Image (cartoon, rainbow, N blue to C red):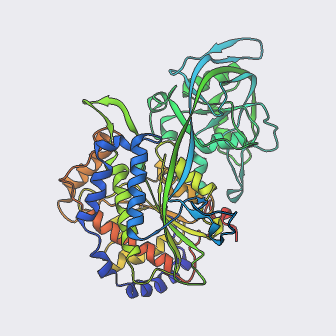
Amino acid sequence: MSKTPLRGLVAASVLAACALAQDPGALDAQITEASIRGPLSFLADDLLEGRGPGTRGDALTRLYIRTQLASYGLLPGGVEVQAEGASDEEGDAETAPTRSWDQPVPILGITSKVTTPMTVTGPSGQRITFEAPSDFTADAARPDPKTAWKNAGVVFVGYGITAPEEDWDDFGDMDLTGKVLLVMNNDPESDDELFAGKRRLYYGRWSYKYEEAARRGAVGAIVIHTTPSAGYPFQVIQSGHEREHFWLPFQDGEPTLALRSWCSEEAALRMCALGGHDLVTLRELAESRDFTPVDLGITIDMATDNEVRRIDSGNVAGVLPGSDPELKDELVVITAHFDHLGIGPEKNGDTIYNGALDNASGCAAVLNLARVCASLPEAPRRSLMFLFVTAEESGLLGSKFFAFNPTWPRRQIVADFNVDGLNIWGATEDLEMIGYGKNSLTAVAEAVAQRRGRRIEPNKQPELGLFYRSDHFSFARIGVPAAYFKAGSDFLERAPQRRRVKASYTTVRYHQPNDEFDARWRLGGAVADARLILECLLNVANADEEPTWTAGDEFEKLRDR
Ligand SMILES: [Zn+2]
C-alpha cells in the first residue's frame, strides 16, 4: 500500500488550524438527515424517470439543481453566454458575457450490428470463423455507418502498455499502422514491485488498451478475456454486445479504431495456433521488460453496420468565488454525477432505474455542501465549484467533457473531490477513500477524520480499479489531484448485520430498478460523511499550498507547472 506523502502531512497540520477557525461544529449542524433526505428523495422519484441522459428526467434534474444553486446565492459556473438585452449598437458597456448554469454536453450513441463475423485466415489459407457473442464481442469506435477490418494483420502486443515511469514498453518501434492488436487485459503480474502490485492502475483497464492501440495507428484491438484479469466472467462482456455505446463527439484528427473487440480465451488460443503460435508461451514472454510485439502471421476480417444518434445533455455548475486576492483564481471542485440509467428492461414489474443511491444520494450531499458553503460569513480563500455531471453511467462522459473543455482555466483547477453513493446503512467509524495515498488529499482527509474520531481507509478491493470508474478520474486525466469518498464498513452499531445489508446492495440493487429511495434508510452515516467531506473541501480551499500528486504516481507527469 502506498505511503502517506510527507509533504501532505506537513500541509495537513497547517490545515487543521484553519479548520478550527471555520468552526466545523456550527457548520456541521447545517447538514442533517432531513437536508440530505429532501433532495435525495426528489431526485430518486419515479417522476424523474431514472435521469437518463437526453431525457425529460435529465432536463428536469438540471432545472432542479440549477434552481437550488441559484437559491443558495452561488454564481453560475457553466459556459459563457451573451447577456440578453445587451446591444453593441448602443455602445453599451454591459456586453461582457455572463455565464450559464449549464455546460451543454453533446453525446453520440453508437449501436453496432455485426455483418461479417470475425474471420481469421492463417498463412496457408486455413480459416476460422468465430461467432458473436459466444466467442467475441465487437462495436464501432468511430461514428461511421459502416466500419470494418479488411485483411488486417494481427499483432500480439502483450499487455499493450507504454509506461515510462515503470520503464516498460510493450510496443518497441514496430509500425502498427492498419494492424489489429491482440492484447492482454490488466498489467504485468510477475513482479509485485511493478505497476503497484495488485492495485489496478489505468494501464490495466481495457479502455486504456483501446486508446493506446488507436494512438499507435491500429485499426482495431481485441482484448483477451480471462476472469481473473477482468474481475468478472465473459457473460458480463457478452451482455454489452450490440447494445448502444456512448461517446463524446470525435475531434478532427483524433485517433480512432474502426472496431474494438473482446474475445474469449479459447478464441485467442485458436487464433494464435492458426499462425503457429502458442498463447501460453506468448503470455509468458509478455511478463518481461524485454518483450517485443509478435506478428502472428494471420489476417482478420470483420464488419459492422452502425446506427449513430445524437443526444444532448449537460453539466450544471455553481461557483462560490474565493475571498483571497492571491488564491481566488484557483478552484477546488466537488463533483457528483446526476444521471442514472433512465428507463430500461423490466425487472419485477419496474422499468425505472431510479439510481437513488447511485447517485441521487451523492447529488444530495453536494447540494448540502453548496448550501452550507454559500452561507459562510466569509468565503474560503480559493474559489469552489459544485459540479453536477451528466452521463457518468455512459462512460464518465460529462466529467470527461468538462475536464477537456473546462469552464475555468485548467491549470487553476487544483483539486477534485467526488461523491458517488452515500452511506445509507448507518454511521461508521471509517470512510473509504478511493485513490488513497495517490495524492496529498489523503493526508487532508486523514487529519480531518482523526480530529472527528474517525479514520480513512483505502478501498478494500484494489483490484477493481475503482479509481478509474467515477468522475474524479476525468480530473486525474488532466493532472488534477482527485479523490473519491465511499461509504465505510466499520459500523458503530450492529456491525455484522449492517455489513451484510450493505454487501447485498451490490448484488441485489446496484444498477437495478430497485435502487429506490426508502424512508427507512439510516442517513446518520450519510450526514457524518458529508460533514467530514465539507471540512476536507474547506481545508483544501483554505490551505497555503495546492494539493500535489505523490512522487512517482501514474498521474504526476500530467500536472504541468
Ligand atoms: Zn455512480
Q: Position of residue 12 (x, y in %)?
A: 48, 81
Q: How many labels does the image show?
A: 0
Closer to us: 189 or 16: 16
Residue at x 26% of width, y 56% of height = 424
- In this picture, residue 263 sits left or right of residue 349: right
Q: Position of residue 507 (x, y in %)?
A: 31, 41
Question: At 69% from the left edge and 63% from the top edge, which residue is drawn?
Answer: 88
Specify the quadrant of the image occupied by residue 38.
bottom left
Residue 256's x, y, as percent?
A: 70, 37
The answer to which quarter of the image holds residue 171 is: top right
Relative to residue 3, is residue 56 depicted above or below?
above
- 355 vs 98: above or below: above
Indicate the quadrant containing the C terminus: top left, top right, bottom left or bottom right: bottom right
Extreme residue toward the front, this view: 90
Depicted 339 relative to depicted 196: above or below: above
Along the line of sight, which residue is nearer the eye, 521 or 102?
Answer: 102
In this view of the protein, which residue sits in the foreground, 333 or 89?
A: 89
Q: Could you say where residue 214 lies in the image, as x and y percent from the top left?
A: 71, 39
Question: Could you tell whether 347 is left or right of 299 in the image?
Answer: left
Question: Could you tell whether 470 is left or right of 359 in the image?
Answer: right
Q: Can residue 86 be seen in this view?
A: yes
**Front residue of this view, candidates 353 and 234:** 353
Does any portion of residue 159 appear in the rendered image? no
Residue in view at x 63 percent, y 59 percent: 478
